[in-house]
Amino acid sequence: MSAITVRVPAKVNLQLAVGPLREDGYHDLVNVFHAVSLFDEVTAAEPFDVNPSAAPLGIRVEGDLAGEVPVNDDNLAVRAARALADRTGRSYRADLLIRKSIPVAGGMAGGSADAAAALVACNELWGLGLPREDLMEIAADIGSDVPFALLGGTAVGTGRGERLAPLETAGVFHWVFALADGGLSTPRVYGECDRLREEAGVAAPTPAVSEALLAALREGDVRALGQALSNDLQPAALALRPSLANTLAAGREHGALGALVSGSGPTCAFLAESAERAHELAALIKDVDGCRSVVTASGPVPGATVAG
Ligand code: C5P
């Protein structure tokens, strides 16, 4: 096979409970991930340039958001492909092409999704046949959100978010995402969360999964799910980007069943009662100040999957 394309979803956090800062610079989390139908595509192809002095891993990015993505060795997809090749102890080559639809630095794990897709695509292209468990291990070394992009569905992540247990859910949930201009740096948002807690004299709680959230997911109860959504990083994201408060308020006013910042933001997520209500809500919030564009999506959807 000379090219493999993998489709990979964005995530929204249904609950993000942030515990204390650990010695390794990460925070202990309870992170309920939910994969939604907003996809990037990553193609891994045998390179045309067989010049042995050329870089073993080429990278290109296409799409409206392409300009914001690093096209060097810092790109998470390149790092993932390199980690996979290193694991085999052999030198492999590939040209990676990312078609971006997931917001960049938007709190929807777009970079992590591309890394997961690159792992699956290069595993196929190079004929390695590594099982998913091995890809999951490599994924966890690349970033806390990468294993979930492989798994998809709805799952609870513990540790720094990389230890996953799939969750039982019923039905389909409909979402609107309000994309903001520019991204937010994840480490900066976690740092602001710590700072706000210190300023308020509040100790970081031990994170625990919300039983109300688990019940809502199990029963497919969209209203209860809307009530149970929570994100401990939201006050920090709002402190760094105050305009997000308007976006959230607009969604609530127009009937969203739940409204929250997605992960470290600045994308805002709104839960709607139906696909039709999601489209209506999208039309109503698209002109709010600070909102660059809106998209609708549904979840849960599968993780990184070979598309061709
Ligand atoms: O794992 P990843 O590289 O995606 O994390 C990016 C940054 O987000 C980390 O460097 C850290 O600042 C923050 N983070 C954290 N606790 C976690 C996950 C991420 O503090 N559990």
Image (cartoon, grey):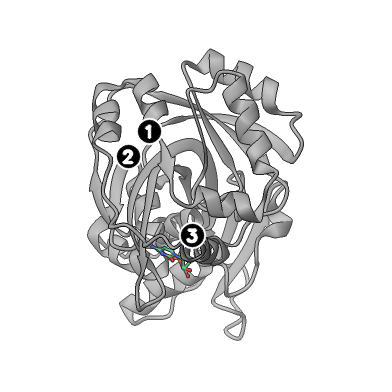
Q: In the visual, does 74 lie left or right of 232?
A: right
The circle on residue 154 is 2
Report whether residue 104 is seen: no
Point out residue 120 in the picture as x, y percentages from the top left corner. 39, 56
The one nearer the camera, 34 or 239, is 239
Q: Against 300, is 88 above or below?
A: below
**Label 1 is placed on what type of residue?**
Pro
**Residue at position x 62%, y 57% in the image:** 184
The residue drawn where x is 41% and y is 75% is: 25
Q: Are marks 2 and 1 in contact (CB under 8 Å)?
A: yes
Judge from the rendering whether residue 169 lies leftward or rightward of residue 98; answer left or right: left
Assign ligand 1 to one image quadrant. Answer: bottom left
Q: Which residue is mark 1?
A: 300
Going by the numbered disc 3, the residue's amino acid type is Ala
Query: Mark 2: is the Cβ under 8 angstroms from ligand 1?
Result: no
Tag 3 residue: 200
**In this view, which residue lies farthest toward the top?**
276
Q: Residues within 10 Å of mark 2 (few under 14, many from 20)?
A: many
Asked whether the residues under the numbered discs 1 and 3 touch, taking CB atoms below 8 Å apart as contact, a structural biologist would say no
Please say if 264 is above or below 279: below
Look at the image and tell me whether residue 119 can be seen: yes
